[in-house]
Image (cartoon, rainbow, N blue to C red):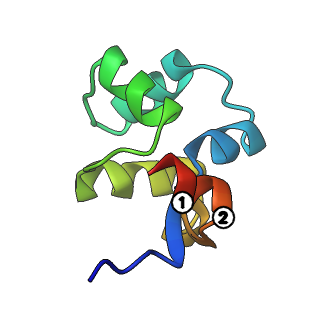
Amino acid sequence: METKLKKRLTWRLRVMLAERNITTATELKRRLNAFGYEITASQLTRIIKERPERISTDLLDHLLTILHCQLTDLLRLDPVTQDDENAC
């Protein structure tokens, strides 16, 4: 028996970046580097554009510090819509 999701995690990194006036992946990469976190430009662009399947807790720690936010600001539990169900 298949159970359908009623809620889904929404990745809000782009929203948080916009709210903090961080307009490019390069700017975010520079800030991460300043805190001692190394990441490639392509990896960073990928996690900005879409919800990552996996993400390190170290990267999350650095993002939360740089963005001055909580985990629930980056990941939000939202109801699954009919469109979300049809996409699966």
Q: Is residue 71 above or below residue 56?
A: below
Percent coordinates x, y for residue 70 in the rendering = 55, 68
Q: Position of residue 26 (x, y in %)?
A: 50, 16
Q: Nearer the viewer, residue 58 or 76?
A: 76
Nearest the eye: 77 or 25: 77
- Nearest the viewer among 9 and 27 is 9
Q: Which residue is mark 1?
A: 85
Please state if 12 lies on the left or on the right of 41 as rendered: right
Occupied quadrant, residue 20? top right
How dense is the environment of label 1, judged by Cα within 10 Å: few (below 14), some, or many (20 and up)?
A: few
Res. 81 mark: 2
Q: 10 or 20: nearer the eye?
A: 10
Q: At 75% across and 33% down in the image, what residue appears?
A: 21
Q: Is residue 52 visible?
A: yes
Residue at 36 percent of width and 55 percent of height: 60
The answer to whether residue 1 is above or below residue 59 is below
Residue 46 appears in which quarter of the rendering? Answer: top left
Amino acid type assigned to the residue bearing label 2 in the image: Thr
Question: Is 64 drawn above or below residue 18 in the view shown?
Answer: below
The answer to whether one can see residue 11 in this image is: no
Secondary structure found at label 1: helix
- For the residues labelled 1 and 2, the Cα–Cα distance comes to 6 Å
Are the two marked residues, 1 and 2, in contact with CB atoms closer than 8 angstroms?
yes
